[in-house]
């Protein structure tokens, strides 16, 4: 029975961990010397945001690269009442947007270094395959 459980657990897909706190992510990046990918998203109303998440950020090629090389931060701005975030999270997301996305673009994706310096940005849906997106991230 234990062997069966171990085999079963081995086949559970592992999803990436998306941080909701940029300051904590930045500390992790400084410790691990990794870059930070920030995704500004409207998860329940922004069609291009949903497409970006499904087609690129949840792709096997991106997840494989990100697990080893990136610290991920999602700043979500849902509109539907059932998806509302806690007030503290809204405040954090708004502060992050004030610093990195003052024009309120969605989706808006940034690659920053451990000190918060912008290395690359994607304004809107990057109309490319996940493999090309990963290559752009790697090139920075």
Image: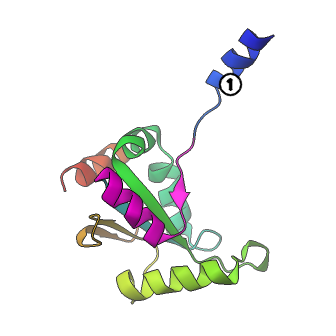
* Left or right of residue 59: residue 131: left
Q: Which residue is mark 1?
A: 9
Please determine whether, in this image, residue 114 is positioned above or below residue 54: below
Residue 83 placement (x, y as % from top left): 73, 72
- Image quadrant in which the N terminus is located: top right
Residue displayed at 52% across by 85% down: 94
Residue 88 placement (x, y as % from top left): 64, 81
Residue 33 placement (x, y as % from top left): 28, 53
Q: Name the one closer to the observer, 20 or 140.
A: 20
Examine the image and state in which quarter residue 87 appears: bottom right
Report the span colored magenta: 15-33
Q: Name the one closer to the observer, 26 or 85.
A: 26
Please determine whether, in this image, residue 140 is positioned above or below residue 20: above
Q: Is residue 1 visible?
A: yes
**Of all residues shown, which one is farthest toward the left?**
139
Residue 73 placement (x, y as % from top left): 47, 64
Please determine whether, in this image, residue 65 is positioned above or below residue 3: below
- Image quadrant in which the C terminus is located: bottom left
Q: Is residue 26 magenta?
A: yes
Q: Is residue 43 magenta?
A: no
Examine the image and state in which quarter residue 9 appears: top right
């Amino acid at each position: 029975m234990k062997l069966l459980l171990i085999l079963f657990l081995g086949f559970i897909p592992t999803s990436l961990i998306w941080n909701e706190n940029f300051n904590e992510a930045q500390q992790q990046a400084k410790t691990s010397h990794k870059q930070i990918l920030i995704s500004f998203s409207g998860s329940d109303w922004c069609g291009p945001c949903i497409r970006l998440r499904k087609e690129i950020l949840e792709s096997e090629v991106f997840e494989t690269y990100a697990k080893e090389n990136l610290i991920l931060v999602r700043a979500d701005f849902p509109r539907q009442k059932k998806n509302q975030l806690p007030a503290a999270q809204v405040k954090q997301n708004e502060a992050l947007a004030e610093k990195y996305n003052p024009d309120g673009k969605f989706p808006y994706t940034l690659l920053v270094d451990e000190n918060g310096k912008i290395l690359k940005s994607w304004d809107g849906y990057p109309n490319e395959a996940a493999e090309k997106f990963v290559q752009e991230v790697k090139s920075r």
